[in-house]
Amino acid sequence: MNVLKGYLQKSTLSLGLVLAVLVAGCGGSDQGRAPILGLPAAELLALAVTPASASVAQGLSQQFVATATYADRTTQDVSATAQWSSAAPATASVNAASGLALGVAGGSAAISASFGGKSAAATLTVLPPALLSITLTPQNPVLQPGATRQLAVTASYADGSSADVSNASVFSAANPAVASSTAGGLVAGVAVGSGQVGASFGGQNATTTVTVANVTLSSIAVTPANASVVVGAGQQFVATATYSDNSTAIISNTAVWSSNAAPVASVNSSGMASGVAVGSANISASAAGKSGSALLTVAASLPTPPAAASLNLGRAASFAVLAGTSITNNSGGTTLISGDVGSPSQTVDPTQAAGYTNYKSGAILSGALADLQVAIADANGRTCDVSFAGGVDLGGLTLPPGVYCYAGAINITGTLTLSGPGVYIFRSALTLDATANAIVALKNGATAADVNWLPVGPTTLGANAVFKGNVLAQAAAITVGDNTTLLNGRVLSAAAVTLRNNQIAK
């Protein structure tokens, strides 16, 4: 009987030891495993984060796992109890309690875990969102022989975003004898007919058909007709072609430029003339057997001419958005206006930066609308430095200060560069239209406060455009496309204004 009793006691003790070891293999603490049934805690030896290296597209997630290794050769998933951090949260963020990382922007970030006095890290590389497609605009443009048109390439990504990738795209012309294309996507009409122009980016392709109209060149005008510079200074000339159907086009980039007195003034292939020595020179542009010229006088010094006066907006100057009838703004959007807002009817009040007011009635609103008309009358009464009988696409051009008058529509495809200090006034007897992703760029002292757009008809600024200057509408609507910005600009109309996720700062 005593023998049996002793055997049972030994068996119970052995079973307890086995259970203690098994339980010890399933638990842990910050200092190692907790003592169970009198056994010592297992020491934490190391911590590892897996996967050691991972890649995700921007906007997607990656789960990391933290694994602890103990002295008794057991391991444990401690992801839920470790403390997680990112060395570059602007590139990749991580949930501090779970190890779930999110790709925020392109680049690499170290994702670290800390537990029980140990730490370990892995690398997460964030890739750009997947490119889905590209589009080429405008589609099916019609050009006159010698005229140019800027093409734009827009990339669409898997995260719903889009971007202008024109400068990074490769352009090609299937029939360059009819329509040629430069590396930057500037298409030129060479001969009557049609041909495809293509663009490729990131493995995606897009095409458009360019038609060169069956018209003949009637004449070429070079403007300004008279200009003066000092030695060493430059003057941009513009060549405008008139065709047999009375249409017009700027051909500055395709005309052949020359100077009849190169020792006095030289001129490059785009019409930029430079004063070399005191004297006078005729600057000519030629194409298809036609030519036009302007006079450039080069002096040692010139009297300072009176500066063209800036437009005085009067009581409208404090407004970034002004509409005589209504403002339509999308609900739940991201529109932010840095300036006063005014209109008697507003669907959704635009969000305004601190310090500005939204006027829906009263003397201030009425006064601003009245002074807007005065400013428009002033701009429309100024003498045209450049006058065209038709419409124009300003994309791809670099223009100096001046008053530009067009009997047709003003279009902007791609980038228009305004260069030099002074007043810019663009008048159109029809509409003002900027394509998606169009850009108005300023350089060499040009300021947005002195850039003014005055269409008689409606204005439409395409999505994601970056526009500069004041759009002043006497009696026509202005539509600002989705996500378009007018930093240093105004949208002022006696009619209606439509906004959608825009940033506008006067």
Image: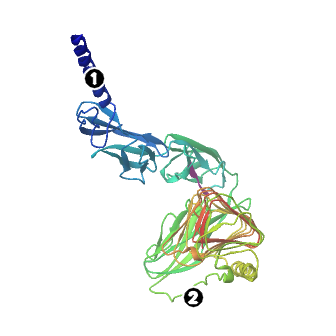
Which sits in the foreground, 269 or 308? 308
Q: 340 or 274, which is in the foreground?
A: 340
Residue at the farthest bottom position: 303
Residue in the image at 35% along x and 44% along y: 123
Foreground: disc 1 or disc 2: 1
Instruction: Return the disc, 1 or 2, that comes first in the chain's sequence.
Output: 1
The furthest residue to the front: 1
Answer whether residue 151 is magenta in the image.
Answer: yes
Q: In the rendered view of the protein, which quadrant contains the N terminus?
A: top left
Residue located beneath label 1 in the image: 18
Do we see residue 178 in this rendering?
no
- The percent position of residue 162, horizontal first and vertical second, equals 56, 50
Query: Where's the C terminus, which quadrant?
Result: bottom right
> What range is drawn magenta here?
147-154
Residue 164 vertical placement versus 367 (above, below): above
What residue type is disc 2 on?
Pro
For residue 472, what is the image quadrant? bottom right
Question: Can residue 32 be seen from the camera position used here?
Answer: yes
- Residue tagged by mark 2? 306
At x 41%, y 48%, the residue is 96
> In the picture shown, does residue 138 fall above or below 9?
below
What residue is drawn where x is 74% and y is 59%? 245
Q: Position of residue 211 (x, y in %)?
A: 66, 48
Q: Secondary structure at mark 2?
A: loop
Label tally:
2
User: Is 337 or 29 nearer to us in this picture?
Assistant: 29
Q: Where residue 492 sits: x, y (%)? A: 69, 72
Q: Main secondary structure of the magenta part?
A: strand
Residue visible at 29% across and 40% down in the picture: 47
The answer to whether residue 62 is above or below residue 305 is: above
Label 2: few (<14), some (14–19) or many (≥20) C-alpha neighbours in 10 Å: few
